[in-house]
Image (cartoon, rainbow, N blue to C red):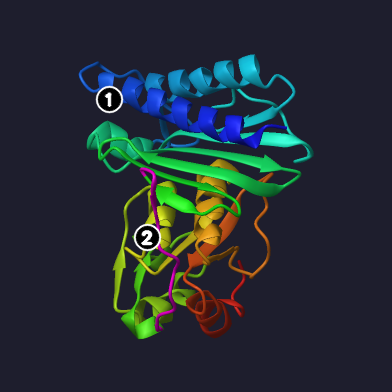
Amino acid sequence: MNWDNIYAHAIKWVNEAGEQIRLSFDQILTIQTKTNANDLVTNIDKEIEQFFIKKIREFYPDHKIMGEEGFGDELSSLDGVVWLIDPIDGTLNFIHQQRNFAISLAVYVNGIGKIGLIYDVVHDELYHAFSGKGAYLNGNPIAGLEETTLKESILALNASWVMENHRIDHNLIIPLVRDVRGTRSYGTAALEMVFVATGRVDAYLSMRLSPWDFAAGTVIVEELGGKVTNLRGDKLNFLSQDSLLAAKPGLHQTILQEYLLDGKW
């Protein structure tokens, strides 16, 4: 299997998809709801996913595809080569702001991350990694992650997890939020993970994400020495939703051991 070709195709297609999204900014969007009134999808989400699927089917017909908008395959395992696609991660931001969203594309082999690409379309920033060969921002190497202390850390998380909600006991997260230097929320898991990868934030925590949300970011963060697990410290489940903790080395273990392992996630 020619991985250099697959990597080159992935980069080329992500750039082409980004240009399609930029051209859509002046269009009137068709917006639909999915699971609830705040879970939105646009015609552009669907068109971009279909663009990727058409390319993958043309060049790699034996590869499998998992896409957020449901145009890929129904997968019961990660055997073989699997592409995981989120055509627009941060659709709510895309609709309301026309910024703070990204394309997320990953290639896994038998459940192991091989290639990860996250494209911040508005800022024309392509974060990409090939396992074992480094991680890059627009072709420039990203420096490896260094350890930091909890009290000097910026934590990315959605504010809803420290408010009363029906999914978890919000009091479990309050001590962590109190002890870090500050918190941020960007509304897109893909960008929050590359912010960990680049040191813009030190850790990112979420209670519920889908595989296409974290597949590419996991490859990039781990390539730079970061650690990615669920909130129980286990390997992520790439076939269903899971919780997520992505953090700098050392800090990941501190957060897990001192704040999370006693919780019911």
Eyeballing the image, is 247 above or below 99? below
Q: Tell me the residue at 68%/52% (across/down).
A: 237
Closer to the camera, 8 or 198?
8
Closer to the camera, 250 or 88?
250
Q: CA distance from mark 2 to mark 1?
A: 24 Å
Q: Residue 234: image x %, image y %?
A: 68, 66
Residue position for label 1 = 22
Q: Which corner quadrant holds the C terminus? A: bottom right
Q: Main secondary structure of the magenta part?
A: loop
Q: Residue 137: image x %, image y %?
A: 37, 48
Q: Which residues are magenta?
A: 138-149
Q: Is residue 86 magenta?
A: no
Q: Closer to the N terminus: mark 2 or mark 1?
A: 1
Residue position for label 2 = 198
Closer to the camera, 118 or 32?
118
Q: Tell me the residue at 70%/29% (across/down).
A: 64
Q: Marks 2 and 1: which is nearer the front?
A: 2
Q: Which corner quadrant holds the N terminus? A: top right
Q: Is residue 140 magenta?
A: yes
Q: Tell me the residue at 46%/21% (across/down).
A: 46
Eyeballing the image, is 175 above or below 165? below
